[in-house]
Amino acid sequence: MAAQPVSRVVRRVLRAGVRSCSSGAPVTQPCPGEPVVEVPSRPRLFLGERAAPFSAFLTDSFSRRHSYLRISLTERCNLRCQYCMPEEGVPLTPKADLLTTEEILTLARLFVKEGVDKIRLTGGEPLIRPDVVDIVAQLHRLEGLRTIGITTNGINLARLLPQLQKAGLSTINISLDTLVPAKFEFIVRRKGFHKVMEGIHKAIELGYSPVKVNCVVMRGLNEDELLDFVALTEGLPLDVRFIEYMPFDGNKWNFKKMVSYKEMLDTLRQQWPELEKLPEEESSTAKAFKIPGFQGQVSFITSMSEHFCGTCNRLRITADGNLKVCLFGNSEVSLRDHLRAGASEEELLRVIGAAVGRKKRQHAGMFSISQMKNRPMILIELFLMRQDSPPALPSTFTNSLRVQVLRHRVSFFSQMVTLWKGGRVPQAPLVAQRWLGSSLPQRHFSSHLESDANPKCLSPTGPRAPAASSGPLPDSDQLTHVDTEGRMAMVDVGRKPDTERVAVASAVVLLGPVAFKLIQENQLKKGDALAVAQLAGIQAAKLTSQLIPLCHHVALSHVQVQLELDRTRHAAVIQASCQARGPTGVEMEALTSAAVAALALYDMCKAVSRDIVLAEIKLVSKTGGQRGDFHRM
């Protein structure tokens, strides 16, 4: 698709009534005859004017000051994106467990008092919350808060924005992944493209500059529209922000779907070689560029290829009241529960300070993140709200528990043509599984041996599949490590062909309620038991041939150890996955990894309780080799 025709059409939609603004602050410029709408004025106390030093509770162990808070107002959304959730929606948190308006404002006041000077409201879709205008107005009264922003899909923006601006809304981010109306409707299963465009128009009309447009770029879906999005910035005060596709629970992320910042930049420079890089603002997540003579600009958010963890100043509060110190982290602490238990301000600050203090220097690499257990994005915030891959043909859907090899994906347009010719739209599988919510945060650990490990080895997901074995050779009735005279012998694999081998094993550690609670709250005196067990499992996989006498040494290309806590059994569930290419399998490596991880967990907890049981150490699945594949029931 050529850049100019599409951009001209969209500009015509947006052009009428557009008035520019030289500053970054929103202003009201009414048409003749319209009443002037003023943003309420109030005293501003800027961060640099504070007499006291920045709050120690919001400063982590790497001296990063967290002055930016994102608050999710709801888990609900009025769109049903193919790659976000099924048409009927996703399991949601009961209303009683969501933060009330007063609880949101109480937490906001506390964070602003401690140094937060920017708050962004997210979702789900924040503009479907009935009291969103009142929340903005209440936040606007907080002394010291400089910026109130919102991230929205834009469907309700044109209708509500005049009220929101009057209430004190400072900045707007609008999520839009395509400029093609038919593709928009196919992706989101709803009409609304022109409503989003109307919302962008209204934001420009009311003087917001720049209006930020968030576009998550996914190969096979919309990477062919990069030039069309950039062309919009020629005559409009837009900041088009191209976001690298990020992994979250349920979205089947893999690196092949991600279009990197450098690849996008190369595409733009081929069309506009004069593209200039702008100075980076402190704590900014975006790398900004501008084409000379264009009114707007282009930015790249490079969370995957070039992280910005070193300057991160963001904290997040989910709609059910959990504090997340890292978007890609899986640890959370419930502020809601402490509020409802009557915690004082000092007690809340201690909880917040402890969570911030545990924030890591940086998030894991892209492949490790893709394996981690984390909330679906819609249950964190709308910032990206990407839950599944670009729409896939129904025949590719699978729910079996196995290590899945990435398939070749049919292009978006060939899928769309095929489906439209048949007069049907594919239904996406349920990809957002029920969040393991409780009054205490769930702790999950997932590991990756190497940052450049083969991405074909993915975490097993979904319900268990029936046990099955396939392949040309049946199971042998002879022991392979015993010779004809009954003496032990090592199998000769020298003549076997090299094949891709993958094995998954699991184990369960029944901890008992006392040890379980200490691990869940990370309060063991010996340290972080889950992290230690995870490392032990990785190390054991690499040392299997030294521990099991007749095992061959295998050069592993990938190891993953994942631990999850099971409240119903007061147990830790361990899953280990190993991959290699060679003449012999990696079942023993996976089993050794799971078993030693379980032993390490026992060692970490034995001072608390010796009534700990190691159970259910078993092979879950294996693929590759002459005897075919195996998948346990």
Image: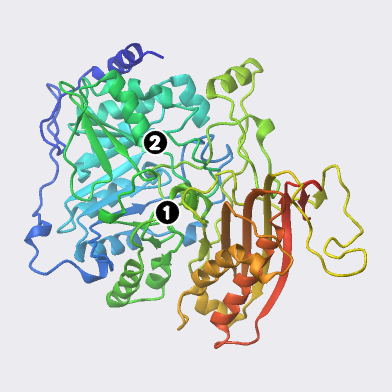
**Image colouring:** rainbow
Q: Where 66 sits versus 178, above or below?
A: below
Q: Is residue 468 visible?
A: yes
Task: State the residue lying farthest toward the top.
Answer: 5
Q: Are marks 1 and 2 in contact (CB under 8 Å)?
A: no
Q: Is residue 461 visible?
A: no
**Looking at the picture, which amino acid does disc 1 mark?**
Phe
Q: Which residue is mark 1?
A: 328
**Looking at the picture, which amino acid does disc 2 mark?**
Ser
Q: Split into 4 quadrants, where in the image is the N terminus?
A: top left
Pick whichever of labels 1 and 2 is earlier in the sequence.
2
Foreground: 35 or 56? 56
Q: Which residue is mark 2?
A: 260
Foreground: 465 or 387? 465
**Left or right of 1: which side holds 237?**
left
Please rate how many residues cluster around mark 2, counting C-alpha atoms within 10 Å: few if below 14, some from 14 to 19, many from 20: many
